[in-house]
Amino acid sequence: MDRPKSGQHDLQATLRLLHSCTDGVVRTHLLLALVLVAAGGLLAGLAPLALKVLIDEVSIAQGAPVSPASDSRSVLLLVGGYIAALAGARLLSALRPLPAGVAEQRLCANLTGRGFDRLLGLPLTSQLKQPPGAAVHALDQAAAGCRILMAHLTGSMVPVAVELCTMVGVLIQIGQPEIVAAFGGCTLAYLSLQAAAAPRTAGRARAIAESSQAVRGAMTEGLSHPENVIGLGAEHAVRRRLDMTLGRLERCWRALQSEHARLGIANATCIAVCATVLQALALRGLEIRSITSGDFVLINVYLLQILRPLESVGLAMRDMAQALGFMRPLLQMTGTDSASGTTWPGQLTSRASGTGSSASPEPSGSPASAAMPPTAPAIHLRGVRFGYDASRPVLTNIDLDIRPGSLTGVVGASGSGKSSLVRLVLRLVEPQAGDLLLDDVPLAAMSPHQLRSTTGVVFQDSLLIDDTIAANIALGCPGATRSDIETAARRSQLHRRICSMPEGYETRVGDRGTLLSGGERQRLAIARALVRRPRLLLLDEATSMLDTVAEAALLQDLLDAETPCTTILVAHRLSSLRLAQRIVVLEGGCVVEFDDHASLLARGGVYARLWEAQGLSDGSHCAGRRFHG
Ligand SMILES: Nc1ncnc2c1ncn2[C@@H]1O[C@H](COP(=O)(O)OP(=O)(O)OP(=O)(O)O)[C@@H](O)[C@H]1O
């Protein structure tokens, strides 16, 4: 693999990413910080010049005729100038964090917000492939990398560059070409060492970022489902998985620290050699009187003064290489790293288009133009083929016509493709062949955002946020009033239960809704879908935890609604589907039957066999059943 080249591309990709997150606030504050540090660097570079002139003046006073005579007032002025320049440099550097901090915080916030949008906008198939917690970790790491880059840019790179240039300028002025050349050569040698080590450091940091992602994944797996882990007695197994990832992370950190130590030794050697060369040249200059005592002191002060900043540039280059490694997982996940040609979209112009308030980007697909039908639409699937991996189809040759405003059930064995069908209708995934239409509008021509804003969906696992019941119901519909929320809760058969809670709609649901029962969580998720007044409602195993009375009442309400909506109900429990007007039976990714309940039973096919297998035929599931103690 061509590491240096990929490192260079990653640097470019990182710079593009940071540029795309730069808004007016970042620009203004960064500029202010750079002006401050550049002025500080200039003063720090000029201060020793006052010292040189001062020493030359004092030498004259002692009878060494190396420079024009001067009075004690000018000596005082020079001392004052020297101290003022040093103090000014320190003061300007102390002021740096004010604007630099604002720029850094805003840039990191923009980066996190944009990264978040970008990750959410990735095709669902890519998102589902990510290890647990990987996306959050990538965002955290990128923000940490961004902070490191910003801190070193304003804290060391720019001030030291200005200070160095000032020193070289002053040395040129005093007419010592060999000392200027030695000074420049030493600086160049030192910086080359850092540049040579940077790709290795970035590589080590990349490995750390990947390993710590694995650690985060193992911790998330172990801690996010305590019931399962403890119930299964899997504590040791999840701990072993964590230990393996921790071991790898430890090795990666050790490798980086060894790299740092090697670089530290090389730096110390380089500095010692450079100091010897410069010292020898300065001494020789003094001996042959090509430089004054003041020049000698100036060179020595520069030598001392340049060591610290040079070291901090060394550290900065090392840390910046590390920061690039930390940014890589986000670049990789969003497909904007060196391996892909994709870049981040244009620069931010205002806060509104940056963090938080920006809408999730449209997922990839054809340009969105066609409008969603204004009433409950018919759904047509024509020769649809789909697979998460194109070579392994999950659904094949799907031809279906679902009537507008109808309730259509979908059944089939586990893995037969029911959830995939729902994902296709919601355009979370795209078919490899065939067409999906709402009325006569192809789904592919429709804005996914518009489609989803008029669709209600409840998945098997519903997201509940750690907030109140009311906030959870209104999650996908920020404009919902209390009355809208209550109406939706009534329709999902949850209102009475909520009213029986001491805090009613203000009851907090806990992390991932753990303070509610499974059935309550499902009804809340259904209320959330209904509050949007959807024209299309997709319920994927959304009623499995409801008792049959609540389920029947909910479905009847959907059928009786004043404003009808086209509903697809995926269910394993066939009794749920008795009210469905039509039922799709899937087997191995194909539609094998599509009719109403009675006709399907009469046909004696797959559906009838499933019905029988669930002990539902002729009410025999109740009659004559024996219960054993
Ligand atoms: N993200 C994914 N990546 C790859 N394959 C997937 C993914 N999700 C599902 N599959 C595969 O697609 C097939 C159909 O899955 P799907 O979830 O649509 O079935 P289902 O009928 O809803 O199953 P269940 O009743 O168990 O929920 C399965 O073989 C499954 O392994």
Image: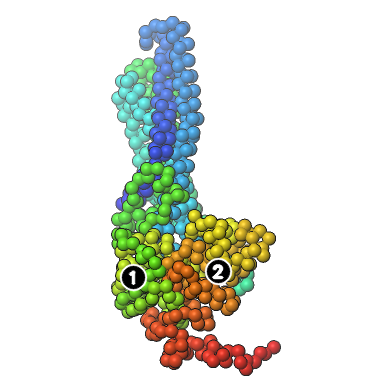
Measuring 42% from the left and 53% from the top, which residue is drawn there? 359
- Crowd band around label 1 with a 10 angstrom C-alpha radius: few (<14), some (14–19), many (20+): some
Measuring 61% from the left and 59% from the top, which residue is drawn there? 505
Residue 466 coordinates in the image, percent (x, y): 58, 58
Q: Quadrant of the N terminus?
A: bottom left
Mark 2 highlights which residue?
492
Residue furthest bottom as drawn: 624
Residue furthest right as drawn: 629
Mark 1 highlights which residue?
439
- Crowd band around label 2 with a 10 angstrom C-alpha radius: few (<14), some (14–19), many (20+): many
Residue 507 coordinates in the image, percent (x, y): 63, 59
Residue 148 coordinates in the image, percent (x, y): 46, 43
The residues tagged by marks 1 and 2 sit, at their Cα atoms, a distance apart of 27 Å
Q: Is residue 61 above or below residue 490?
A: above
Which residue is at the front of the view, 332 or 296? 332
Residue type indicated by callout 1: Asp
Measuring 61% from the left and 92% from the top, which residue is drawn there? 623
